[in-house]
Amino acid sequence: MKRYELWHSEADGEYAFFPADDAGLHPDRGDAARLIWSVDAASWDEAQAKKHEFLGWEPYQPMA
């Protein structure tokens, strides 16, 4: 299992979603972004599916 984090920027309303242990992917948005949710998942696709559910979006469709 890997932990994934969802960050949200109040300034522009955008989301950033990435593995928590990958410091190179953390958003560089100054004080605008904050961590709003995290999830443990066995794969990127599972993490994306859970994120879509959390945000109330349509079900995640993995890329072919």
Image: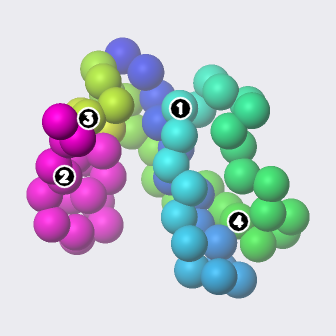
Q: CA gap, disc 1 to disc 2?
A: 17 Å
Dot placed on the residue nearer the N-terminal end, 1 or 2: 1
Tell me, yes or no, whether the two marked residues, 3 and 1, touch with CB atoms within 8 Å. no
**At numbered mark 2, what does the secondary structure look like: helix, strand or loop?**
loop
The residue positioned 15% from the left and 66% from the top of the image is: 58
The spot of residue 1 in percent (x, y) is 36, 16
The spot of residue 16 in percent (x, y) is 56, 56
The spot of residue 19 in percent (x, y) is 53, 32
Tell me, yes or no, whether the two marked residues, 3 and 2, touch with CB atoms within 8 Å. yes
Q: Which residues are magenta?
A: 48-64
Dot placed on the residue nearer the N-terminal end, 1 or 4: 1
Tell me, yes or no, whether the two marked residues, 1 and 2, touch with CB atoms within 8 Å. no
On residue 33, the disc is: 4
Local crowd size for mark 4, using a 10 Å CA cut-off: few (<14), some (14–19), many (≥20): many
Give left or right: position of 64 versus 16. left
Dot placed on the residue nearer the N-terminal end, 3 or 4: 4
On residue 60, the disc is: 2
Q: CA gap, disc 1 to disc 4?
A: 16 Å
Instruction: Work out whether 25 lies above or below 59.
Output: above
Q: Quadrant of residue 24?
A: top right
The residue positioned 80% from the left and 54% from the top of the image is: 28
Q: Quadrant of residue 63?
A: top left
Q: How many marks?
A: 4
Residue 54 located within the stretch drawn in magenta: yes
**At numbered mark 4, what does the secondary structure look like: helix, strand or loop?**
strand
Local crowd size for mark 1, using a 10 Å CA cut-off: few (<14), some (14–19), many (≥20): many
| Residue under label 3 | 45
On residue 19, the disc is: 1
Residue type beneath disc 2: Tyr
